[in-house]
Image: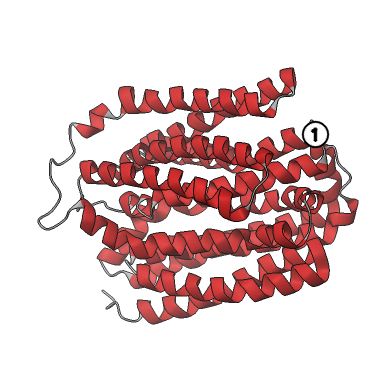
Amino acid sequence: MRKHNGALWNTLGSAIYGLNSFIMLMMVSRFGTVEEAGVFGIAFTTAQLLYIVGLLGVSHYQMTDYKKKYCFADYKKLRYLSCILMLAVCLISIMVLRFTKEKSLLTILLSIFMLLNVVGDLYQNLFFQNNRLDLSGSALFFRTLWPLIVFCFTLVLTGQLVLALVLQILCNLVTTGYYIKKVAPAFLQKEPAHSEEGCTPKTLLLECLPLFASVLLMNFVINASKYGIEFLLNDTAQGYYNMVFMPAQVINLCSQFIFKPMLNQYAKLLETKQIAQFRKVLVKQMGLVAGFTVFCCIGAWLLGAPVLGLLYQKDLTAQVVPLIWIVFGGGIFAACQLFYYIFVIMRQQRDISYIYIFATVVSIPITYGLVNGMGITGAAISFSVVHIIILAAYSILFLRNIRKVNIK
């Protein structure tokens, strides 16, 4: 029964988390101009990148550390360090990007909100690590839902974006605190007091640095098109692009419920060297992602612009082509994410780093050329093209690595 509840809560948590940024941008768009939506969009994007800094590449490692190589205390110590680093990078980013006062304020508030998510993620991973997907999923669900409700109601009643963000932060603080104080202690009592011999926060950091670099570069690549617009176009173009970009994030985050519950099975199949079954599960999940992507692309072509236009209360009829490219790219990105988790389980962090270093290098000229030449449509095409390159690289390296494992 718990297994089924876990799948349900994971689905609900992934769904509401995937919809969170979509709903927030929708509310800002409905109660403001396209330009204001653009300002909020780039601030939110920057805060999301800072969230990656806060995780420091440790999150997915902790989730898959089923043998408890590192104790929770070491994960917690490293998370303290990453939170301090996140705040420092926030201030540096604002100065380097030369944000206006409005963008700076929104970026700071959204970064504080993300900081609380970084703390909450530590405990969600604890639940996941102990095979309590139900608690991990429900924590993500409620920690996202209640602050989102507060944000929406405040914005509707007052029209004040800054006030809405402040109250959202306070609500997140309360919900995160609940899981830390009321739920986590039962798990912490069972945690090993020490990590395995020779394992310290420093060695954990060194192990996860390649993963952190790859995740940071991954998110830079995801958002390269947005920063291309930030530097080459204007806030109005940014607003329109963020509106059509949101479905890609929803596709990716919602598709994770397809494969996240299977991570433990992947790990066990790999440990027992059941490679044929491993490949079978992988192909099946890739097929599900592909089918979902095709369905969404057809939906984007037929109904995407009018539906999104209705939600955002803006005319998006001129953005159909960029929308289809974005939805297609979102499906490719979801497939890349599945490979990412597989490579983490296989402990091939260095390969992930190599892939995203290469992707970062090629994304800059591709994004610049397409955005400069084709505007919003070029940004959408660049997003898809870069992720096709990444998926091809993942596939090649996966085939190479899996051959090294002896079939049971």
Q: Residue 259: in sight, yes or no?
A: yes
The residue under the point 39% across, 42% down is 83
Quadrant of the rendered image containing residue 223: bottom right
For the residue marked with disc 1, what is the amino acid?
Gly
Question: Horizontal and vertical percent for residue 104?
Answer: 61, 41
Does residue 59 sit above or below 327 in this rendering? above
The residue under the point 42% across, 28% down is 176
Question: Horizontal and vertical percent for residue 190?
Answer: 17, 35
Q: Nearer the viewer, residue 233 or 259?
A: 233
Does residue 328 sit above or below 191 in this rendering? below
Q: Nearer the viewer, residue 144 or 290?
A: 144
Is residue 390 rendered to the left or right of residue 28?
left
Residue position marked by numbered label 1 in the rendering: 32
The residue under the point 47% across, 40% down is 10
The residue under the point 47% across, 50% down is 89
Question: Horizontal and vertical percent for residue 375?
Answer: 81, 64
The N terminus - image quarter? top left
